[in-house]
Image (spheres, helix red, strand yellow):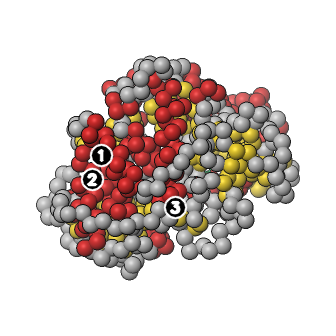
Amino acid sequence: MVFVSKFPPVNPSNLPVHERILAACREHAAADKDAIIFIDAETTTKKRYYRDIESAVNSMATALIKLGFKPGDVAAQAFPNCSQFLIALLAVMKCGGAISNASAIFTDYELQLQFSDANATIVFTDEDRLARIRRAVALCPNVKKIICLRTFPLRSEFPENVLDFVELSQTREEPINVNVSVDSIAILPYSSGTTGRPKGCMLTHRNITTMLDIAKNHMETEVAQAMFGKEKATWNKEHTLLILPWYHAYGLNTMFETVLMGMTGLVFKKFDQIVMLNRIKFYKVKLTWLIPPMLIFLAKDMMVPIFNIHPFLKVIISAGATAGKQLCEEVKKRFPNAWLCQAYGMTEMVQFTTLPRFEYGNCFETVGSLGATYEMKILDKENKEITTTNKVGQLCFRGPTIMKGYLKKEETDIIDSDGFLKTGDLGSIDDKGIISVTGRIKELIKVNGMQVPPVEIEDVLLLHPKVKDCAVIGVPDEQRGEAPKAFIVKKDHTLTETELTDFVRQKLSSYKWVESYDFIDEIPRLPSGKIQRKVLKKMAEEQEKS
Ligand code: ATP
Ligand code: MG
């Protein structure tokens, strides 16, 4: 049984991504010549205006062409969130190339893997990362040039053998126009590799602009209801937090949506809790896109009530990883005025394939409805289509944002012969068409043949007032095959294992009881909020050996 979206269809534009984004910048600049696209959240003094983006992009694109960068070529960038990230991305696209965004905190080894696999010929970065980039590039003969942004405080000399980003973006030469096909690759993001090695996802201009249209439509309909109620929507007066890293699909989308709507984005180079609370208060921020660890912070941290920000936040969107029911309820208690909702998606489909509907209220356990243009089927363990609602199986999606495939992996078995992308995630759909995601197939713990999603136990543990953060994995168990093991970050140092054992036993049936606990300082997570279970499994294995 194939479920179809009930959102009104969108007619994707035929513009390539850069033209679409630049048109939005032009439009917002015309409406208000002082419209600000980005404010540096930390300093708030550094600002970038909508009117300045296009000339910087044109200058950079011309410079790239002069450097021999051709349609079909790939450039990589390792920037933290900053306006130059957007300028580099649009300039590369304008030349007909693809941009591969890497994390600003990657090690030289991780950078090198991505730069070589993507076959990048140019790398953008800033001075703070330059030493690491040089070490990575030294092992990538494919990289011909590094374009570097100077950072403050200025060092005495401009580094050698690199090009100056600012200079190249200020040449103001006549723009060279390249004809860019909407079916060519625009972005080449790498998956984080929590379930296998990182892979390059080939996303075309059309994939991305379709997502932009779907997301914009969702903002103007569902999100607007929560933000503005019956009042006229005045998007260009709004500030929003750009707190998620843009190199990752979710963060990138929050940035694109901010630009499309003409809002001002408060750009975070890194997540800082106090700056976040402070900026929400100062700019009366109504809308935030967050990931589950940030929800944990909002639900549990003592600082949050002190800032008194609950009157402002009207929309809290969570995505990237599972936010459990109990956690969402705790957040809602502190933010009664907010529509707390979730969206679900993956890099392989640009971003969101499910989106929340305002009329269905808060999403405590659900991730919204099938987004515009998507179809979904759910497969059981034998890969047969499930034909009823409320039954859990593997979620598979079909729609215009599904990637062309993984780079250099001709046989992409993640997409089936009918064009459905098999997500590896488990979930179900109810009679109203609301979708729930219950876990990732590869993360399920198999206790006596029964499947336990770690998230279910984590959600219970997080409820404990003395628990700050937690993660659950499966460890080998002689009798039961596997058993759940929990890693706990204490909020209160008096917390004991016995307290946790009693707590879990009250709430969960016996096969889900935690076998052993380990108290640690921090849960290893990815920027998307995902727990790095591989790292924890390794820790558990090493403990076992010693
Ligand atoms: P990985 O290497 O772990 O796949 P990634 O870099 O590919 O990470 P994404 O593409 O953002 O990162 O990850 C997509 C996955 O994130 C989904 O398959 C799903 O498991 C999870 N996910 C995203 N949004 C949600 C959500 N709202 N609820 C639960 N899980 C989610
Ligand atoms: Mg993935």
Q: How many marks?
A: 3
Asked whether, in this view, residue 350 is left or right of residue 28, the answer is right
Q: Quadrant of residue 167?
A: bottom left
Residue 164 rendering spot, x and y as whole percentages: 21, 64
Asked whether, in this view, residue 202 is left or right of residue 62, the answer is right
Q: Which residue is the site of mark 3?
A: 203
Q: Is mark 2 within 8 Å of ligand 1?
A: no
Q: Is residue 194 visible?
A: yes
Q: Earlier in the sequence, mark 1 or mark 2?
A: 1
Mark 1 vs mark 2, foreground winner is: 1
Dot 2 falls on a residue whose secondary structure is helix
Going 39% across and 72% down the picture, which residue do you hit?
71
Q: Determine crowd level at label 2: few under 14, some 14-19, many 20+ residues with C-alpha closer than 10 A.
A: many
What's the amino acid at mark 3? Leu
Q: Determine crowd level at label 1: few under 14, some 14-19, many 20+ residues with C-alpha closer than 10 A.
A: some
Q: Which of the numbered marks, if any, corresponds to residue 149? A: none
Asked whether, in this view, residue 461 is left or right of residue 174, the answer is right
**Contact flag, marks 1 and 2 (Cβ < 8 Å):** yes
Q: Which residue is the site of mark 1?
A: 26
What's the amino acid at mark 1? Arg
Q: CA distance from mark 2 to mark 3?
A: 23 Å
Q: Is residue 494 visible?
A: no
Q: Residue furthest left?
A: 156
Q: Quadrant of residue 282?
A: top left
Identify which residue, 193 or 461, lies in the foreground: 193
Dot 3 falls on a residue whose secondary structure is strand
Going 70% across and 53% down the picture, which residue do you hit?
396
Residue 529 rendering spot, x and y as whole percentages: 54, 45
Q: Which residue is the site of mark 2?
A: 54
Q: Earlier in the sequence, mark 2 or mark 3?
A: 2
Q: Determine crowd level at label 3: few under 14, some 14-19, many 20+ residues with C-alpha closer than 10 A.
A: many
